[in-house]
Image (spheres, rainbow, N blue to C red):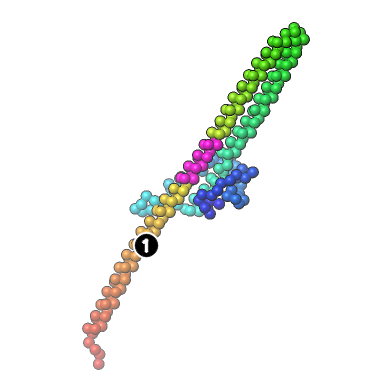
Amino acid sequence: MLRQELTPRIESNPNGLVTNGEPTPSASPGIDIQRELNRLEEMILDSPRIPLTRRTLVDEEQLLDQLDLIRLNLPSAFQEADIIVRHKDEILQEAEEYAASILQNAEQRATQLFNETGIVQRATEEADRLRQQVQIECEALQQQTLAEVEQIRYQAQQELDAMRNRILTECNDIQTGADEYADHVLAKIEHELSDMVRIIRNGREQLQINESQRPPLY
């Protein structure tokens, strides 16, 4: 899970969930990834600032829960690409069926013309023209669909990479800010302890001086 490592190996299982090699809970249906990213940004912006720095303290448990929610729902973009691929196959199949229907109608029309007028050449030319037209339209539709699918996959990968880099950068900034704040607090404590040790040492020295100056008792 994301809590175990900030850059998990993302895989898609048959159910459309993203995993790192282990079973994961089901993603919430109908989630808006952009809205959850905005919530993540608000969570970081609304967190308390570290004094004298530009760093922010973020609730780690809340941040990791939000990242888990986003990570589990990332496959929606890939599911949309798969839907388009399936639609592409359906469209191509419909185009092929449409072409077959046109060819069949053309052949029937040619036969009818031959039976009625005997003009075989005209029917053959019409059938060839329709066949070529349907073939050109099918090839153009196939190229357009493949280009759209490739574009969607590329955009999904780009968004995923950008989000991963942004999360890693923000986590590094948070860790650096926390380290600087801890160092500042420890330095302040060290200074105060040094002052206390100096006061104690001076007090003991004064007691020793007073004791040496006190007249002996008989």
Image-based side of 124 in relation to 140, left or right: right
Pick the quarter of the image with the C terminus. Answer: bottom left
Q: Residue at x 61, y 43 (%)?
A: 16
Give the main secondary structure, helix, strand or loop, of the magenta stretch.
helix
Residue 172, how many percent across, how many down?
Answer: 43, 51
Image-based side of 165 in relation to 195, left or right: right
Q: Residue at x 27, y 79 (%)?
A: 207
> How many residues crowd around disc 1 within 10 Å: few (fewer than 14), some, or many (20 or more)?
few
Q: Quadrant of residue 148?
A: top right
Q: Identify which residue, 75 or 98, lies in the foreground.
A: 98
Q: In the image as oriented, which residue stretches furthest toward the front?
A: 121
Q: Residue at x 68, y 22 (%)?
A: 99
- Range covered by the magenta-colored residues: 152-166
Q: Quadrant of residue 80?
A: top right
Regarding residue 107, the answer to whether it shows in the image is yes
Q: Residue at x 61, y 21 (%)?
A: 136
Q: In the image as oriented, which residue stretches furthest toward the right?
A: 115
Q: In the image as oriented, which residue stretches furthest toward the bottom?
A: 218
Q: What element does badge 1 sit on?
A: helix
Residue 62, how many percent across, how many down?
Answer: 50, 51
Magenta stretch encompasses residue 109: no
Image-based side of 98 in relation to 59, left or right: right
Regarding residue 66, the answer to whether it shows in the image is no
Q: Identify which residue, 85 or 71, lies in the foreground.
A: 85
Residue under label 1:
186
Residue 44, how many percent across, how many down?
Answer: 44, 48
Q: Identify which residue, 20 or 136, lies in the foreground.
A: 136
Compared with residue 62, is residue 157 higher up or lower down, i.e. above or below? above
- Three-letter residue code for mark 1: Leu
Residue 40, how many percent across, how many down?
Answer: 48, 46
